[in-house]
Image: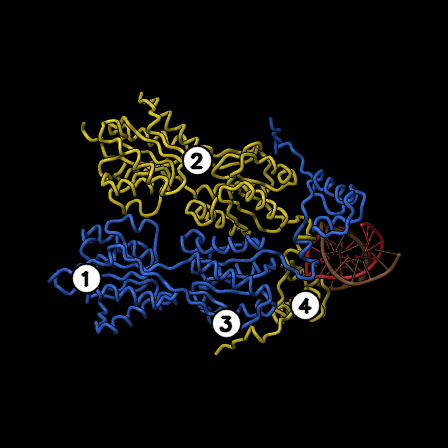
Chain colours: A yellow, B blue, C red, D brown
DNA sequence: CTGAAAGCGCTTACAG
DNA sequence: CTGAAAGCGCTTACAG
């Protein structure tokens, strides 16, 4: 039977310090410090006495205090600034960072920016004021120059997902343009000539790159870019669904798109919703950028250009730790390939006119 | 045109301290401290001088140092121990915690335990050694008694998702038993008498409670509990798919289940996969515990008992901050209701024999 | 309104 | 093998 302490009546017991442990064990603070840090050169008897005192006092070393004094100044924590901890992309990335950090016994401070540059700056500042050893940032602002002071102070910095502006630093990105280009080529391969582009906010660099890939593929295929088939600034499932419905109204007149390239997760899902509502999911081809869970349980199964957020996180974290280990080589720009996953929706041919 | 500093050649510039700022501004450290902390009673001229020095030196106050000295000892950071930062349940919960913490200008340290008690303890210890102001923990171990020392030291602690063992503390849980019971009742409502249970590892408390709800509903409906229709210890999509396939082989002999209650996300998805493979998705009813994205885009749409991880995180964080604000009332056990979302798969009637 | 001294909990740099 | 003194970057508790 375990004792149940009642927090309502339980008096707080102040945390024991290294000094308390030293007093109880009858040794100096320095000796306790040696035991806590696993340094050798302490007689077994003293080690025992210290261990006992630690256990009886529930002593927990104060890592902030030790970091303050230590010459390295390392806090064994890194900060991760991401778009939204709740979205699958950010959370897969974060988890991969955690796995790398965990091996090094480093902790993660994490925060969401929600496409808000003020948040980006506030988080970076808050992390910096806690003296994190390094920073992984998915930048949203138009200018990351404000981070130069941190880099100059020796805090390594790796950007993910989007390239930083106004600052030369390591970054790990998906090859957005190439992925988008592949998508359009696959659609053209099965005979489509009127391929719509449904995209996120045009000023987001990744959206811009995907649109560039779309345009390039059209050019390479000798297909016209029809402005009526291009919709930007879609940011929610509902936006995308409405845009898809509007786009497909033109289907009857022989000028509507016969295929859709959706440049982002939520846009893809909105497009699917609309296609299902219109009963067109088996007649209009669709390839989305970004994989998502259950894409292969839908009917038709959804073809996608898959990114690898987990790999992005892993590579970024490893680069960061390399910098922490003293690598001062030139900033790297690592482009991660995308994977074309054809599951069905992208292989639907255009209806014979 | 922005200057691009090159990290390879850029010499590190040691971080300025409060002392440096004081020297440059020609005031005492105490005056700088007053300005940094927004205390009044400093002449505008000195405020200006200090601000200028701060800006020229890119001074960032060291919050660890100030927390060390401050009487409150607050670090303005809380630790969050979750099952897996990459899964939708954990990440929605984390995000909600972040939103509450953000209002209080408090940062989040987060880590995944992956159903491993050693990880749980290691994370708690790492957070404690950094003197987080509070802890939110989704416990996996069989005994959380080891946390008593932290509570006694005055670190508030709120458990989420699962009840702690061997320790009386605040917790926020879904009403798992009631939710599971609802699911079985809904299936019985449309005429099912042979309802299978597909469950996660039986020793996980939440799985146990969901199984209890299943059993209770069968009793209430006067339905027999057929051991052949109960499968425990399913932990992956593949496990669940195999179990479902095995279960449904008996369909032909009139003794197989006509409906399935899947007690967890991945199990539900595995069941759907198997049903689709067998072409039975429109003939066998299915209700899953836990909602998931795109459940309403599948065919048939998937009925679920939805939890609210976001609400769970919000409530837990608010409880934690209440404790931090000095509330020393008795530990609370908050039960969050589940929502029955009937979308189609749960309303499929049994085939007429 | 301002600042000099002491101290938070640790480690460093010594000396023995 | 062990420990006393100084100091990391800040705030506290004073005194003026």
Vertical relation: A282 (above or below) B195: above
Q: Nearer the viewer, mark 4 or mark 1?
A: 1
Determine which residue is flagged by label 4.
A21
Same subunit, labels 3 and 1: the answer reads yes
Tell whether label 3 touches label 4 (CB within 8 Å): no
Q: Nearer the viewer, residue A168 or B181?
A: B181
The secondary structure type at the circle numbered 4 is helix
Q: Where is residue B121 in the image (x, y as percent from the top left)?
A: 51, 62
- SS at badge 3: loop
Chain letter for mark 1: B
Does residue B240 appear in this view? no
**C-alpha distance separating marks 3 and 2:** 50 Å
To which residue does mark 2 refer? A201
Vertical position of residue A319 compared to residue B315: above or below: above
Mark 4 residue crowding within 10 angstroms, few (<14) / some (14–19) / many (20+) = many
> Residue A45: where, in percent of width, then height?
66, 69
Mark 2 or mark 4, which is nearer the start of the sequence? 4
Residue B258's disc number: 1
Q: Which mark's residue is nearer the viewer, 3 or 2?
A: 2
Kindly identify which residue carries mark 3: B167
Are callouts 4 and 3 both on one chain?
A: no
Is there a contact, CB below 8 Å, between mark 4 and mark 1? no
Q: How far apart are marks 1 and 2 (CA)?
A: 47 Å
Q: Of the residues tagged 1 and 2, which is closer to the observer?
A: 2
Snapshot quadrant of residue B280:
bottom left
**For residue A185, what is the image quadrant?**
top left
Chain of the residue under label 3: B
Image position of A48 (left or right of D16): left
Instruction: Please give the name of the residue rendered at 25% of the width and 35% of the height, measured from the top-left corner.
Output: A284
Q: Residues within 10 Å of mark 2 (few under 14, many from 20)?
A: some
- Of discs 4 and 3, which sits in the foreground? 3
**Closest to the observer: B126 or A244?**
A244
């Amino acid at each position: 039977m375990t004792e149940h302490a009642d927090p309502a009546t339980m008096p707080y017991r102040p945390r024991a310090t290294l000094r308390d442990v030293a007093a109880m064990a009858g040794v100096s603070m320095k000796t306790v410090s040696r035991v806590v840090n696993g340094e050798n050169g302490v007689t077994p008897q003293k080690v025992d006495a210290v261990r006992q005192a630690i256990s009886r006092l529930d002593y927990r070393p104060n890592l902030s205090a030790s970091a303050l004094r230590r010459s390295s100044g390392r806090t064994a924590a890194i900060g991760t600034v991401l778009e939204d901890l709740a979205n699958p992309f950010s959370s897969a990335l974060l988890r991969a960072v955690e796995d790398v950090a965990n091996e090094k016994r480093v902790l993660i401070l994490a925060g969401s920016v929600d496409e808000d540059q003020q948040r980006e700056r506030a988080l970076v500042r808050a992390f910096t004021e806690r003296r994190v050893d390094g920073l992984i940032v998915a930048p949203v602002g138009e200018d990351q120059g404000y981070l130069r002071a941190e880099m100059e102070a020796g805090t390594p910095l790796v950007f993910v997902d989007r390239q930083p502006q106004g600052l030369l630093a390591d970054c790990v990105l998906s090859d957005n343009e190439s992925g988008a280009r592949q998508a359009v080529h696959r659609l053209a391969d099965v005979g489509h000539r009127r391929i719509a582009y449904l995209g996120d906010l045009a000023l987001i660099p990744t959206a811009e790159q995907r649109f560039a890939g779309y345009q390039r593929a059209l050019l390479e295929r000798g297909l016209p870019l029809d402005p009526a088939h291009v919709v930007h600034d879609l940011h929610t499932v509902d936006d995308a669904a409405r845009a898809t419905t509007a786009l497909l109204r033109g289907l009857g007149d022989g000028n509507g798109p016969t295929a859709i390239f959706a440049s982002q997760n939520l846009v893809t899902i909105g497009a699917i919703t609309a296609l299902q509502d219109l009963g067109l999911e088996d007649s209009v081809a669709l390839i989305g950028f970004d994989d998502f869970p259950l894409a292969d349980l839908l009917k038709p199964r959804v073809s996608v250009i898959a990114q690898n957020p987990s790999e992005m996180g892993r590579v970024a974290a490893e680069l960061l730790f390399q910098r922490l280990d003293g690598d001062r080589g030139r900033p790297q720009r690592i482009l991660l390939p995308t994977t074309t996953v054809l599951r069905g929706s992208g292989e639907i041919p255009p209806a014979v006119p």
